[in-house]
Image (cartoon, grey):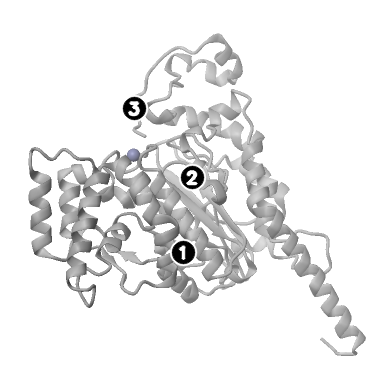
Amino acid sequence: MTTEPETKRAKTSDDVDAMETDDKENVAMEVETKGKGGNLSGAVVRRKMRDYYKRHYPAEMLFEWLAHGNDKKHDKVDKSYPNRREFCFVLNKDDGGEIFARYQCFADAKEFHKAVNNQQPARIEFGMVCNRKPKERMSVDLKPVERELVFDIDMTDYDDVRTCCSKADICGKCWPLMTVALKILDAGLRKDFGFKHLLWVYSGRRGVHCWVSDERARKLTDETRSAVAEYFAAVKGQGRSRSVAKMSPMHPSLKRAYTDVLEKYWVETYLPNQEILTDQAKLDQVLELINDEGIREDLREEFSSSRNNSKSVERWQVIVDTVKKALQKKQGRNYKLEGNLEQIIFWHIYPRVDIEVSKHMNHLLKGPFCVHPKTGRVCVPIDPAVAEYFDPESVPTVVDLVDRNQTLDDAKETFNKTFWKAAEAENMQRLTAKTRAAKEANQSGLDF
Ligand SMILES: [Zn+2]
């Protein structure tokens, strides 16, 4: 989505009526026309943000989640827990810069929402839960105690495998790369680590975030967080120095990623969308990855022929047939082409996780339901079960919500249905179990 030069037009009278008084003098400068990809201008987003956070931002719902049951009226809750969470408000400065107001904390949802309305942040980031209230940091030794395990996947890390867009831009042709990443991580976190409470969120522009909220995930140390993140880093490094994990034999989790997601997406979506095998630079990149010089040269010659105008899917079939034939000749044993085709696919479309974000408890991450300043879109939750139908361009913007009577009902429903309902039920079960344990201990005369 390119941010187009601002198209200036006077607004219609309906639009003017919907605006606040102090906005009316800016009518001539109002820029509501959407650019390529439906992005709003930064000026419009900033102006509508205030209203958005006041009327639409689900502060109560988010605060309740972040309290993980400890905001309940129950004698087994940890009452101090909600107030020990760090919030960071990112405030816009008049000169275009940003101020990071860190170490804020709130006793309850009401206090949180009130602070949001008063300070009018452009972005709200959620951090760690500390041993003490973060705002006491000057007088106490503040330490991280727990934090959701988070993942951040950003489309800019896929620039060398995209032919449609680059940098912060995205489109329907490259967005499926995010779907692939989401599906593979979701399956890995659930099946290999047994996590159940995963909240997937659109980052508002060019990526996705995941918040793993199981108690076990929240209590991971920085070391174990690193280990989990590394587990998903089967593809490492950038550009030509990118390395791919061993493919022969393949680790069971990679095998699952390959057969359940990658193999299908590669042929049905990625190749037709990106046409990398008809793009000279990208084709060279693929041929470079073939571990046999002879085959590499033969294919290069075949594809460079002016008579060869086949598309990427057909060209891939040629590569597959050629490599398989060569493998057969060597009976597939200890040969450098073994796993080579899979390696090429992993190199291109296996998730590229920004592991630095996952490694540390005290890493801040933009919370769900924030507004992206560049697109005006709300960071809405994504249902992982139907992630392939998620369309970033249909995500509501601040203008849709503030001026056009759209609501966040669907987004909140996704939050509840795909994530919160089950997590909340487990929070309650945990409290009930604590009560039961205390009662039993009491009855047996044990002193706790
Ligand atoms: Zn694109």
Q: CA distance from mark 1 to mark 3?
A: 33 Å
Find residue 47 and report its horizontal and vertical position in percent: 52, 29
Vertical order, 348 against 37 (above or below): below
Q: Is residue 327 left or right of residue 417?
A: left
Which callout, 1 or 3, points at the residue further toward the start of the chain? 3
The amino acid pointed to by label 1 is Ser
Cβ–Cβ under 8 Å for marks 2 and 1: no
Q: Which residue is mark 2?
A: 388
Find residue 443 and report its horizontal and vertical position in percent: 92, 85
Q: Secondary structure at mark 3?
A: loop
Does ligand 1 reach within 8 Å of label 2's beta carbon? Answer: no
Q: Secondary structure at mark 2?
A: helix
**Mark 3, other Cα within 10 Å: few <14 / some 14–19 / many ≥20:** some
Residue 358 numbered mark, or none: 1
Q: Quadrant of residue 174?
A: top left
Q: Which residue is mark 3?
A: 4
